[in-house]
Image (tube, helix red, strand yellow):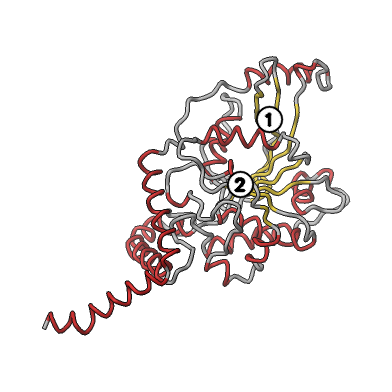
Amino acid sequence: MMDSLFQSVVRPALILLCAMMLFNLPTLMYKIGMFLRGILYLLFCNDKKWRKPQDPFIVIGPILQKEKELDQTADDDDDVIERKTIYFVRHGESTWNDTFNKGSHRSQNAFIIGFIPGLIKALLFELYLILSGKLDSWFYDAPTSTLGLNQVENLSQFFKSTNITTDSNNDKVAQHVAILKASPDAPPSKLLSSNLRRAVSTMAGGFKTRLARRPQEKILVVPSLQEISRNPDTLSITPAHMSIQASWIDKTSTICNFQSTFTNQVDMSLHLGNKPIGTNGLKRMREFCNFVFSSSVKEEYVIVGGHSIWFRSFFRTFLPYKSDHVGKTKKVVNCGVVAFTLLKVVRKSGQPTYMIDPNSVDVVYGGFD
């Protein structure tokens, strides 16, 4: 009986399975490489470990006080503060979040009951993606989930519904939205994003009206924004300098034509593949600060699509240590937008010091949770 079952069902299934793998051998080898790289990161990556740097307020606090006393910018060359306004835009919920995180949209009991079935579903779908030869993944570089794309659409609608009126000078949110929307009378701003698909999808969908109105504008992918974690979902599946490929969820979405945006309005020139295994979050946060104050970013306003742990780590590192701001302990909600002023001072040593002005942090949309 067992021999008959093997002859009629199991053996043909194994032959078909092997044939499909061989037919899609390049994709299979790439996925095996991703799996091995994921194991290496789990074992050896110290992405969340670094020595706590000096409190930036020790350097910048006295200069701010001097400016306040003079009621103007200090004129000492060693004490000049440069300023940029940064907007953090967290990505919509991802498939990894859907599988492993409870989220605010379901109860603890619902998450526990649904965890094993959800994990089985995710594993089976990952197997389907491998056998069908698709360079896609549920786990690696986890894309935006269906719920996540709904959150992205809600962000886009928020931008549309926030009117810029004649009394906007007294409305901080309206001023921020004017910049985010690139309104005609707003100062120039630049769109940046992490190299992970869920961040780029959020920028493409959330800012779709702006991008459609400005077809020459591009979202610049900046490697230093890659999420701080050793988990597989924080590893980029996109080869260096190649265009991002829309996930199976992005392709069925009616929010916008994600693939067209990825191909035509996402600049991958700085994308070098995955973060080095020897890096850590502090190094990348400092690289980001150096980049936004470099000649590559002439705009005073910088809009950043990124990730919860990276953003929270940034608030912990660059807010004064005595500040008890919620951003140090809570995550920006999915598709939340938070604005702040980033300060830079270069002392005689030549090393720049960066600090977030604690009085400048504004919640534009969503907030912290």
Against 252, residue 217 (above or below) is above
Helix, strand or loop at label 1? It is loop
The quarter holding residue 339 reads top right
Q: Amino acid at mark 2?
A: Gly
Helix, strand or loop at label 2? It is loop
The quarter holding residue 17 reads bottom left
Q: Position of residue 294 (x, y in %)?
A: 72, 34
Tally the marks. Answer: 2
Question: Label 1, label 2: how many angstroms apart (C-alpha)?
Answer: 18 Å
Q: Is residue 259 left or right of residue 51?
A: right
Identify residue for label 1: 357
Q: Amino acid at mark 1?
A: Asp
Q: Position of residue 50 (x, y in %)?
A: 47, 29
Residue shown at the point (58%, 70%) measured from the top left: 251
Q: Crowding near pointer 1: few (<14 within 10 Å), some, many (20+)?
A: some
Q: Position of residue 281 (x, y in %)?
A: 52, 36
Against 232, residue 295 (above or below) is above
Of callouts 1 and 2, which one flags the residue occurring earlier in the amino acid sequence? Answer: 1
Most extreme residue toward the left is 1
Using the image as rendered, state which of residue 146 and residue 214 is in the foreground.
214
Q: Is residue 189 left or right of residue 274?
A: right
Residue shown at the point (39%, 57%) measured from the top left: 32
Q: Crowding near pointer 2: few (<14 within 10 Å), some, many (20+)?
A: some
* Quadrant of the snapshot with the N terminus: bottom left
Q: Which mark is residue 367?
A: 2
Q: Position of residue 144 (x, y in %)?
A: 54, 60
Mark 1 vs 2: CB contact within 8 A = no
